[in-house]
Image (cartoon, rainbow, N blue to C red):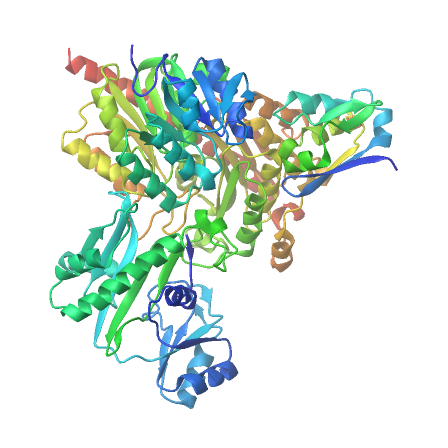
Amino acid sequence: MARLLEYQGKALFKRQGIPVPEGRLVQSVDEAMNAIDELGFPVAVKAQVLSGRRGKAGAIHFAEDRDSLSQAVRELLGKQIQGSPVEGLLIEEKAEVQKELYMAVTADPSTRQPVGIFSPKGGVDIEETADTEPAAIFTTPIDILRGFYYYDAMDLLRQVGGLESREMLTLANLFTRLYQVYREYDCKLAEINPIALVEQGAMALDARVDVDDDALSRQTTLDIDFAEEAGERAATLLEIAAATIDESDHRGTVHFVQTDPDASYARTAGKIPVGLDAVGAGTGLTIMDELVPLGYYPINFCDSSGNPVGSKFYRITKVIMAQPQIEGYLFVSCVSSQQLDNAARGLIKAFKELYPRTGGQPNIPCVVLFRGGWDDVAVDLFREHGISDGRWIKVLGRDTTEKETAEIFDALYREWKKETGGLQ
Amino acid sequence: MMAILIDESTKVLVQGITGREAQVRVRLMAEYGTKVVAGVTPGRGGRTVEGVPVYDTVKEAKEHHPDISVSAIFVPARAAKTAAFEAIDASIGIITLHPERVPQQDMLEVIAYARGGNTRVIGPNTIGLVSPGKSLVGMIGARADLAREFFKPGPIGVVSRSGGNTTTLCYYLNKVGLGQTTAIGMGGDAFVGTTLIDVLTLFEEDDETEMVAFFGEVGTRVEEDAAEFIKQGGFTKPLVGYVSGRYARAGVRFGHAGAIVSRGRGTAQGKIAALREAGAQMVDHFGEIGEVAKTVLAEYRRSRG
Amino acid sequence: MRALEFEVRSGGTIRIDLEKCESCETKACVKMCNATGMGQILELKDGVPALKHSLEEVKRGACTEDLGCELDCELYGNRAIVITLPVSKLDDYLENSSEQPTYLREP
Ligand code: SF4
């Protein structure tokens, strides 16, 4: 999903009438000083990064005066928090909090419908609460065709105990608005943690909004131009480039994610980084199951599905091969219903352009497995174009398992390493 | 003999029939022997595609072909919900939703809407299903001659969360001489209309199906829920399976929306353990599933005399 | 120079240098285009490849971008076709990358 930064999530909350503290996004000390003229002390200074648990990661400071504010801003800006650089800070009025609560709307995988979740224990990791104190979590299924009304929320909140009638009404109204956020912006998760009960009512002190990237094309008011699951980090430049491939052409899809963008995970684990293109996500996962025990780690994941046109395979091959850390490449298809000859042509065109001097024969170990529709044509094409004759490429046909493919790659890699000494 | 869901007599409608993908698949289905009797593309009524008449709405198609029981939906993802609603409103018995990347909340609406009607929804992001030698719906098999090669009649019910690996699984079974009663791609998304439990229930009730082979993936609770269902006695036949993604790192979505491990939940290891505990035979290498299935089936047959 | 140039759906162009086509004995591109997929956009006109459909239809997706014409022309024709398919923003990545991709390096 596309996860929004806190300030973006709060902007959506505000649009739907959920109160949030007055705040300003700043990117320098000067901007912070201007902001404080409007906000007044004390304030919270919060790094805008996607990772959760910012409190524990030291990403939230408080300031009572100009000195402590400028110090906090300097300290946080440009800092790395769990791998993400801090590029913006949200400066917010510090609220006088009486109680911290939790509220969320998401989809329940078992009932396959939206679920409203409430806990009187806000401010902490809800996953932890779920493990340690399941009785403190209250849920209600929501009929998506009917909607979610204040009295549905009231009936949930009545079970909690310890909430006054007026508090319940305030929270119930907030809950229905949160559901509106969830529906309006195609969220996978709309979460407020914590909600503060303050003198004037209730207020969202934080916002976590995960937008369904499959719905981004109709979410034109959201300022998100990237639609791929990168998890708890911002998209890489290469992922952004890869995402453009599906944008203009819906004939098949190529999901590309850098599972280990700088290959540091692979290297720390003592694995050799390789590039991977798989026909079908399940195939990508299966070949990983075989490659990792042999000592190779695919630093990207790519699922080319839905019978992509040849030009998509060409483009995605260029993207995969652009990763400077890879010491090998695999294209692996399941026994696929796709027109694999199109895949072959895309790969061949890319290889020829990447390796013009050798007519497309690669300089790193490459294994290409075609199984399924037009697989014989695909294998023949590689031969016709003289690429299969290359020293460091093996083009395999239908009667090869994933395990055998990984083993063939392993043997090829060892030979390559021995003979060439590897990449300089 | 009646296979689950589809057989020789099944009459199929194709929604979005004038699109590129649909045209290729109509040819596949017709050549396989599936009775594709009508198509729908709004605004294109009166045409034909591969000899199949095109109508403007599903209702209109049903007026001309009242015995349509299955609709294969090949429309862009953004139009999937409306197409599914249209089929549900026309009381089509089974719909297969083929588009990928259907917005999650659209799917929640479709699932909810189907609950109130008489329609079974398969997918989205499904490759379709085949009852070998009888009927094929969707894009499974790619080409009729390949489909005949990949899918053989036999005693195994096949179900997979991965479209492509539905076929791979059948391929591995055929290699050891085990054919299939029906093979179904459930669709890889986190929210699908027909779950693994639903499919196991259908296979449990099907006399021709002696055992089930399954391909699973990281993410969701599909396998865990099914393991629980088996333990409670909902499914009593032998189950062999493979769950892919042992090295999937948390927080990364592997291809489609279902394949994501978050916060230590939905791991392949957890799923394998749960299914083993429920008595399923889980293989370590996908390519071994044929051999293992053969052994398990032989034992099962022996045990039943 | 006589050329046939047209845009394709995914964003890119196909350019055929028709001067080279006159002496081409195989016309492999046309055969290929009509043999594969659902494309079938090329036909022979006055002895050289021409489009069967309007430029708009081709761009809207009549061309299925299977790349067969370029590859077959390279093998069996006169190397007259160049298909240009940029990956937008890939250059941004390559320029910002501190290391060279492996295809530019020597093992
Ligand atoms: S194969 Fe090449 S040279 Fe021959 S007609 Fe086609 S484009 Fe021209």
**Which quadrant of the frame does ligand 1 lie within?**
top right
Q: Quadrant of residue B237?
A: top left
Q: Quadrant of residue A57?
A: bottom left
Q: How many marks?
A: 0
Residue B284 screen position, x and y as percent:
32, 32
Judge whether residue A172 can be spotted in this image.
Answer: yes
The image shows residue B188, relative to residue A219, as above or below, that is above
Residue A261 screen position, x and y as percent:
50, 54
Position of C32 with respect to B301 (left or right) is: right
Q: Nearer the viewer, residue A339 or A415?
A: A339
Residue A227 screen position, x and y as percent:
49, 51
Residue A40 screen position, x and y as percent:
39, 86
Q: Quadrant of residue A45?
A: bottom left
Q: Nearer the viewer, residue A3 or A400?
A: A3
Position of A265 with respect to A142 (left or right) is: right
The image shows residue B238, relative to residue B104, as above or below, that is above
Judge whether residue A228 can be spotted in this image.
Answer: no
The residue shown at (47%, 72%) is A88
The residue shown at (51%, 18%) is B52
Q: Nearer the viewer, residue C69 or B304?
A: C69
Q: Nearer the viewer, residue A150 or A72?
A: A150
The residue shown at (59%, 30%) is A342
Position of A364 with respect to A22 (left or right) is: right
